[in-house]
Amino acid sequence: AVQVCKIHINGMTCTSCSSTIESALQAIPGVQKAQVALATEEAEVHHNPKTVSHNQLLQAIEDAGFEAILIS
Ligand code: 9UX
């Protein structure tokens, strides 16, 4: 099953920031699709919850240098 996780991201200032985070999320096994919107400061991540947890998604964003807060 696929779950959609929404995450608020602080610290993005240009589209390269959002592209970097999208690539980092898409590289994680279990992530089917990741979209990061600079304007709304939100990420939407389609993932298999049996393979990857919400905390792993948050950690990947933090590792890229941004603050990540789980919305849903
Ligand atoms: Mo743009 Mo973001 O020059 O870390 S890539 S601000």
Image (spheres, rainbow, N blue to C red):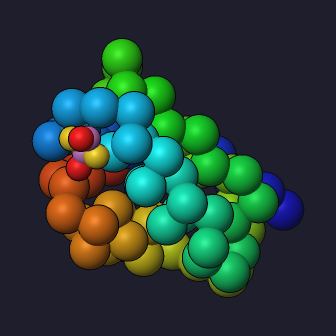
* Residue 31 in picture, x, y percent from top left: 68, 66
The quadrant in which the N terminus is found is bottom right
- Residue 5 visible to an observer of this rendering: no
Instruction: Residue at 43% x, 55% y: name it.
Output: 20
Instruction: Residue at 51% x, 74% y: name it.
Output: 53
The quadrant in which the C terminus is found is top left
- Can you name the residue that lies furthest to the right here? 1
* Residue 25 in picture, x, y percent from top left: 53, 63
Instruction: Residue at 59% x, 40% y: name it.
Output: 35
Q: Is residue 14 left or right of residue 15?
A: left
- Residue 57 visible to an observer of this rendering: yes
Of the pair 47 and 23, the residue shown nearer to us? 23
Of the pair 72 and 31, the residue shown nearer to us? 31
Q: Is residue 56 left or right of residue 68?
A: right
Q: Quadrant of ligand 1?
A: top left
Of the pair 37 and 58, the residue shown nearer to us? 37
* Residue 69 in picture, x, y percent from top left: 24, 48
Q: Is residue 63 left or right of residue 2?
A: left
Is 67 rendered above or below residue 53?
Answer: above
- Can you name the residue that lies furthest to the top here? 39
Q: Is residue 36 left or right of residue 35?
A: left
Of the pair 72 and 27, the residue shown nearer to us? 27
Instruction: Residue at 36% x, 17% y: name it.
Output: 39
